[in-house]
Image: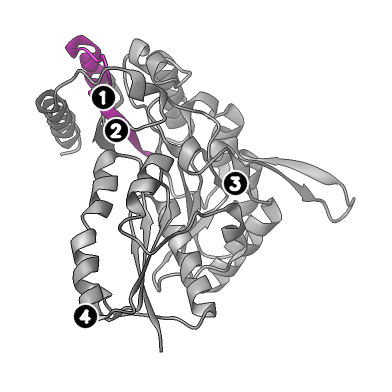
Amino acid sequence: MKKYYIITYGCQMNKSDSERIATILEKKEYRPALNIEEADLILVNMCSVRQSAVDRIYGLAPKFKALKKKNPKLKTILTGCFLKEDKQKLKKIFDAIIEKNNKLFSTKPKREKNSVAFVPISNGCNNFCSYCVVPFTRGRLFCREAQEILKETKKAIKNGYSEIWLLGQNVNDYKSKITQISTQKNIEVNFAKLIKMINDIPGDFKFFFTSPHPKNFSDELIDVLSKCEKFGKILNLPVQSGDNEILKKMNRNYTAQEYKTLVKKIRKNIPDIKLSTDVIVGFPGETKKQFENTVKLFKELKFNWAYIAKYSPRAQTASYKMKDNVSLKEKRRREKMLRTLIKKQNE
């Protein structure tokens, strides 16, 4: 019996993709290996968000070489999010490289036996933030049919999953149609309407979602979430910077003040919500004064937690052409400063 082993790096979307890839492999009569040493096929689902994530893939080469000495029939496959430049170099490490596409959504996921079910609602992104490779690795925005999402969610709840995570690179860009049974007419479904439909599914569960964009986090969405008793009251709202000039260079399409106003509106309507954010320190040209604006925003908004990343240039992005002129030492100092601040605020 042939056995497979999947290594998954990166976001929840990649984890969700791996669940569907597992189903495909099992249809080809592979069975899961308990560890990498007993596998006949190793599939790596990679992430390209930061260069450090890509470097981890190169680090697998010696391991694969040693495993192939023990098992000459071992096959290694790479999939996931990768740039064309990386793909050419990684061909030397893997026996095959397979690009994912949106047909993967039609495959039933082989979920882990826990309480969490990942349900992707969209893939790709149209925003082109200047530091982000997603439009180049996952493509432009693709939205699943609402009926398909509801069907998968209902099945997960029926199978005992009590946490439903709706996934997308920018979930509040979601748009689809659904046929109303009574009139047989197509109804436009945006993210707020989809959320309400999820909330109305019978069962004992909570739903969450990631990731939204502040620029189009609508009043309608806030109103719907405030009325959804099954919403888990946890929200990650990436700010990326507290300085307007840096936000403009990032192509984020909002100001720091607009972000603060949005957060205050969300907290007013959903008082018990726990709010986290994403931030990048050391973006090209970010001065100490501009970083201090991010510190001020953190002090004012008092996030429950934050995901802090040191900027790293990625090929094909607009920021790749900008001079990466903040030293690694300074990036680390800024990262540590924000981490310390968040910790103190939540003690």
Q: As shown in the figure, which amino acid type bears the numbered disc 2?
A: Phe
- Residue 298, numbered label: 1
Q: In this view, does 178 lie above or below 127?
A: below
The CA span between labels 4 and 1 is 52 Å
Q: What segment is highlighted magenta in the picture?
A: 273-296
- Residue 81, numbered label: none
Which x, y percent locates residue 118? 48, 58
Q: As shown in the figure, which amino acid type bears the numbered disc 1?
A: Phe
Whether residue 35 is in magenta: the answer is no
Q: What element carries label 1?
A: helix
| Front in this rendered view, residue 196 or 249 | 249
Q: Do the residues labelled 1 and 2 touch (CB within 8 Å)?
A: yes
Q: Is residue 242 visible?
A: yes
Q: As shown in the figure, which amino acid type bears the numbered disc 3?
A: Ile
- Residue 303, numbered label: 2
The CA span between labels 3 and 2 is 24 Å
The outermost residue toward the right is 183
Quarter holding residue 239: top left
Q: In this view, does 98 lie above or below 160?
A: above
| Mark 3 burial class by Cα count in 10 Å: few <14, some 14-19, many 20+ | many
Which comes sooner in the sequence, label 3 or label 2? 3
Which comes sooner in the sequence, label 3 or label 1? 3
Is 37 placed left or right of 194 in the picture? left
Residue at mark 4: 70
Q: Can residue 117 be seen in this view?
A: no
- Residue 195, numbered label: 3
